[in-house]
Amino acid sequence: MTQPFNHRLRSEIDRKNSRLVLGLDLDPDRKSKLHGGGLVSLKTAAREIVAATADQVCAYKLNFAFFERFGSAGWQWLEELSQFIGDKALIIGDAKRGDIGNSASNYAHAILNNLNMDAATVNPYMGRDSLEPFISDPAKGAFVLALTSNPGANDFQFITENVPLHRRVARWAQSLNRHDNLGLVVGATHPEYLDNIRADAPDLPLLIPGVGAQGGSLAPAVNAGTPAAPTIINVSRGALYAGDGALEDIVDAVAFYNNKIRELE
Amino acid sequence: MTQPFNHRLRSEIDRKNSRLVLGLDLDPDRKSKLHGGGLVSLKTAAREIVAATADQVCAYKLNFAFFERFGSAGWQWLEELSQFIGDKALIIGDAKRGDIGNSASNYAHAILNNLNMDAATVNPYMGRDSLEPFISDPAKGAFVLALTSNPGANDFQFITENVPLHRRVARWAQSLNRHDNLGLVVGATHPEYLDNIRADAPDLPLLIPGVGAQGGSLAPAVNAGTPAAPTIINVSRGALYAGDGALEDIVDAVAFYNNKIRELE
């Protein structure tokens, strides 16, 4: 039977006598003797680095940002590189994902199953259900962001004062809206807080998910909009799987929600 | 000259007389009349839905989890679908990314430039520098997660008590470690807080990034480890671009860090 991830980690540390993780953040904008910046060159470089260091590190950390930069070709690289590393060391997928349960399951599946990585980094902001899919298989692990080292860590991570974090987020986004291009995601299941958020962020459009299948209340969401800072309402499953899920059902559902919103304006 | 994103959003709302966003979260596990769950079928379905609804919605929301589930093929789908939507409506890349500056720049580039989406959802947890690359081009926008509608939203988003959020995160992860497969990311630039985090999460391994190029302090990080809950130390640029960045330089740097850590144990 496979051991829990933290046990596997300890074993790998023992086996290599190494607590070192190597982050394979090859930067196409920064050429070196090993690579010229192009994708083919980076791929070769990564393999060469792994082959040369695998007995020296307990894990590789693959920061998805450096792969997604290349789009689908970058994801192919993730696939190839994960396979190449194989059992040479543990692989930590540094994807910092965090999303509601079903989406988190998809992310976890992509990272831990399809890419067959051993662990992922997870953003805690959305709470428990965004983490659970990453840790439901004991053999796979998650590293939850706790205290990060970037300058922005001070914005929220030391928060202690008597204001709800979400209001702090709203005020913060409002204060950064100097290009008039920021908005907020506000769940429609919390209509009682919309007035506060609206007051905190009077200039920001509000993207409201959760209407429809998630049963959010539509009226307060629509009413929180202003001409300069409208609310926009998202529907997903509520339209895509309306009725039998046939095309005409979807079109009908879209029209239905549109009309409902218009009536409330 | 291109208008700021929020202006473009308002224009699109006016043009369509619609504040509706359609989330194209096609679920392969949930077949419908429109699709049988396979990728080819989902692709066709998405195009058909867009063609049939584009004049009814101000934006499409593409939740990356539903695409990444298919790996690089899913990213090809993202590319194809974004191109297909084109100017028919705005595209919100619901990727919920959040990472330190340079990684955030790569994510923003992938979403806003390569995929040519109009906006992205961004996780606020890591603060300002994780958001900036998404809003530096006024024509592109960001929706910052403020109050989400999932059950886990209660874990952090209403936090008001007199404990730093990062200690709360550490205690929370510790309490969820029932499979012995959770760990914490703790920046090496905050050595003075390591003791508290260690006390808050005695059973969790600590992944320490930021050693090397970011100048974090190595000794406290190593010392915070225990046999059952070790610290593991990440290095990325500090090794990859050591010396001339030649392969032997990298191998040497890896050995150097390994030795440094071993000396501190």
Image (cartoon, coloured by chain):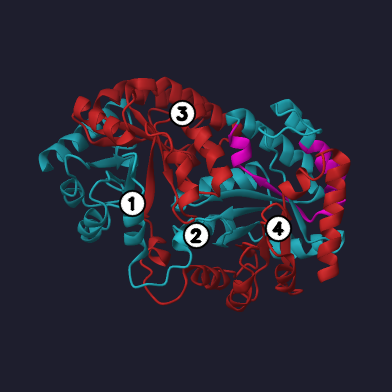
Chain colours: A cyan, B red
Up/down of A75 relative to A155, above or below: above
Quadrant location, the C terminus of chain A: top left
Report the amino acid beneath label 3: Leu
- Alpha carbon distance from label 2 to label 4: 23 Å
Residue holding disc 2: A124
Q: Which residue lies under the disc numbered 3?
A: B42
Q: Main secondary structure of the magenta part?
A: helix
- Residue B182's spot in the image, x, y percent? 62, 64
Q: Chain of mark 2?
A: A
Q: Nearer the viewer, mark 2 or mark 3?
A: 2
- Disc 3, disc 1: CB below 8 Å? no
Question: Residue A260 colored magenta?
Answer: no
| Residue B69 visible from this viewpoint | no
What is the secondary structure assignment of the residue under circle 2? loop
Image location (x, y in percent) of residue B215: 69, 57
User: Three-letter amino acid code at disc 4?
Assistant: Val
Q: What is the spatial separation of the Cα atoms under label 3 and label 1, in whole angstroms?
A: 40 Å
> Mark 4 sits on what residue?
B211
Q: Chain of mark 4?
A: B
Foreground residue among A133 and B13: B13
Task: Name the residue located 62 percent from the left edge and 73 percent from the top edge.
Answer: B192
Write the start and end of the magenta stretch as one range: A46-69
Which one is nearer the viewer's eye here, A167 or B90?
A167
- Discs 2/4, front: 4
Q: Disc 1 marks which residue?
A: A175
| Amino acid type, callout 2 | Pro
